[in-house]
């Protein structure tokens, strides 16, 4: 008998992943102004790298660090090479938002095809901590609970970083007013590249966590990109706490819908997205 | 202290500055007046690095800064308080002030500078924890000026600090600008409020259509028929 509590816990487990992914996109879109269509590909890179490392005997917990650094580096370099050049040649931020989104679309195909060459199209998976744990009377895999723990931990750590450190404040200032942040002494180009890197790292880390519980393959990314976009709109564009809360909210909704009809979860997300754009386009935390 | 020579500035194909030269000496209050669209803000943006000139030079303490980015220029000691204040709306008053102290050297002294700024603007201390978006226009302007002082500048560029404020606030803002002189901060001030400005400034530049059309001591300009008619309505 599935109880209400089971549904809530399952929703939180899913929501933790969504929260991480959406916070990453929120940094990239809210600060660096890149609506990164290739966001999910960094999740996929994290997931497949973790799978390969697992075959070599590396624990996924170690992969969290490795993939975090790897995707951060990738994101940072991609921003410095592709997006910074686009920003320089764009006459306005609005023009940059358009061209950077198209560029990230192209990036998605490039990354997918490179990954196909390296890993092939097979669906892969491994078994890690697949021990059932009793949580308030319901059974959940230990890997799922580890995932939730890390998602919350990393999300909160990031929040503290943004609200209490010098660099975190610079990132928030740049999100609110780039030119004025520059006048305060913030090296804008550097901060934007860092934000893109952090966003990619959050995706990569989410990918590692996803691979602990779900099968992974070269085309897994796009669905997560869509979910991230929905959560970012749900939480309010550019609001990091909004993305965090929005992630859990969407996870809960997904879990409730899945209880009635598993095939309708994604459809429900789209429905929420459309209703939201009608009723409250600024999102739950937006102004 | 600062010397701009023959600045030419373009926005796309539109020319905003035509051969503009200006000097500021240490501990002076220099005012820049002129009608809207005369190029005053562009000149300030060119000095602070927000806009790079097509030609011409800006020398600060003997070094060319015209091709540097804003963050380098703040570190060198020039603080720019932009038009409208541009406070960070979703940060608290205190966080806004802390952002002003972002350059490394200023960051170390930020607690001390913060107390000094609170001393100048007691209202900001009262509103310390409030989000900047909830402040009144006058409070925002005070916050912007306080934030500009947090980097411990030697030269402060102020773009219409009294714009849109109630008369009592205008008087207050001008009183504070005058006090900056005693703290060895040099000021370049853009103002629409010419009467007040001429009372506190040492020298004035008048801009029209992207050019400097007149300059001199305040007393001289007060005698000029052009200034009396165009800006004072006498």
Image: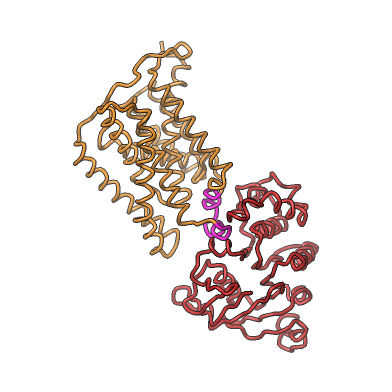
Chain colours: A orange, B red
Prevailing secondary structure class for the magenta stretch in the rendered image? helix
Q: Quadrant of residue A143?
A: top left
- Depth check, front residue: A287 or A157: A157
Q: Please give the name of the residue rendered at 52% of the width and 34% of the height, measured from the top-left corner.
A: A156
Image quadrant for the C terminus of chain B?
Answer: bottom right
Q: Is residue B213 left or right of residue B179?
A: left
Query: Residue B24, position in %: x, y?
Result: 65, 76
Query: Could you say which is closer to the camera, residue B160 or residue B26?
Result: B26
- A108 lies above or below B204: above
Give the residue at x 58% y 54%. Answer: B104
Q: Is residue A181 above or below residue A16?
A: below
Looking at the image, is A86 positioned above or below residue A32?
Answer: below
Q: Residue at x 59, y 72 (%)?
A: B60
Picture residue at 80% right of the left edge, 63% below the top: B168
Image quadrant occupied by the N terminus of chain B? bottom right
Q: Horizontally, is B167 left or right of B30 in the view?
A: right
Magenta stretch?
Answer: A170-185
Q: Position of residue B2 (x, y in %)?
A: 61, 75
Of residues A149 and B15, the one nearer the viewer is: A149
Q: Position of residue B153 (x, y in %)?
A: 65, 63
Residue A174 drawn in magenta = yes
* Percent position of residue B205, x then y: 66, 80
């Amino acid at each position: 008998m599935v109880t209400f509590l089971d549904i809530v816990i399952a929703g939180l487990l899913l929501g933790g992943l969504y929260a991480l992914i959406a916070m990453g996109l929120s940094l990239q879109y809210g600060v660096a102004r890149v609506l990164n269509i290739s966001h999910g590909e960094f999740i996929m890179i994290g997931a497949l790298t973790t799978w390969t490392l697992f075959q070599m005997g590396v624990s996924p917990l170690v992969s969290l660090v490795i993939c975090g650094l790897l995707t951060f580096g990738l994101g940072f370099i991609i921003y410095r090479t592709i997006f910074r050049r686009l920003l320089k040649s764009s006459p306005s931020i609005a023009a940059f938002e358009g061209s950077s989104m198209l560029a990230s679309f192209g990036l998605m195909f490039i990354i997918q095809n490179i990954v196909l060459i390296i890993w092939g199209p097979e669906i892969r998976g491994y078994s890690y901590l697949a021990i059932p744990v009793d949580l308030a009377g319901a059974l959940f895999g230990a890997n799922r609970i580890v995932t939730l723990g890390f998602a919350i931990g990393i999300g909160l750590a990031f929040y503290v970083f943004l609200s209490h450190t010098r660099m975190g404040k610079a990132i928030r200032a740049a999100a609110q007013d780039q030119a004025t942040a520059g006048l305060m002494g913030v090296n804008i180009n550097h901060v934007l590249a860092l934000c893109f890197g952090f966003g990619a790292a959050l995706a990569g880390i989410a990918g590692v966590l996803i691979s602990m519980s779900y099968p992974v393959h070269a085309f897994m990314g796009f669905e997560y990109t869509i979910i991230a976009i929905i959560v970012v709109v749900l939480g309010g564009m550019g609001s990091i706490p909004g993305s965090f809360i929005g992630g859990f909210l969407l996870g809960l909704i997904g879990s409730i819908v899945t209880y009635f009809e598993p095939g309708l979860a994604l459809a429900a997300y789209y429905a929420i997205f459309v209703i939201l754009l009608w009723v409250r386009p600024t999102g739950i935390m937006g102004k | 202290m600062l010397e701009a020579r023959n600045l030419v500035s373009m926005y796309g194909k539109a020319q905003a500055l035509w051969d503009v030269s200006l000097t500021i000496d240490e501990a002076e209050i220099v005012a820049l007046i002129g009608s809207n669209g005369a190029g005053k803000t562009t000149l300030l943006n060119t000095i602070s690095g927000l806009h790079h000139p097509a030609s011409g030079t800006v020398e600060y303490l003997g070094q060319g800064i015209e091709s540097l980015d804003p963050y380098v220029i703040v570190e060198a000691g020039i603080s720019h308080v932009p038009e409208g204040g541009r406070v960070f709306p979703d940060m608290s008053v205190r966080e806004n002030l802390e952002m002003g102290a972002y350059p490394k050297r200023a960051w170390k002294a930020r607690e001390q500078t913060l107390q000094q700024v609170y001393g100048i603007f007691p209202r900001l201390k009262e509103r310390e924890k409030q989000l900047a978006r909830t402040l009144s226009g006058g409070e925002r302007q005070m916050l912007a000026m306080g934030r500009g002082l947090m980097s411990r500048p030697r030269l402060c560029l102020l773009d219409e600090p009294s714009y849109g404020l109630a008369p009592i606030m205008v008087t207050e803002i001008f009183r504070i600008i005058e006090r900056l002189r005693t703290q060895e901060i040099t000021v370049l001030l853009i103002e629409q409020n010419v009467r007040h400005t001429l009372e506190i400034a040492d020298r004035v530049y008048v801009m029209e259509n992207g050019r400097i059309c007149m300059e001199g001591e305040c007393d001289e300009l007060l005698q000029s028929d052009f200034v009396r008619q165009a800006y004072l309505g006498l």
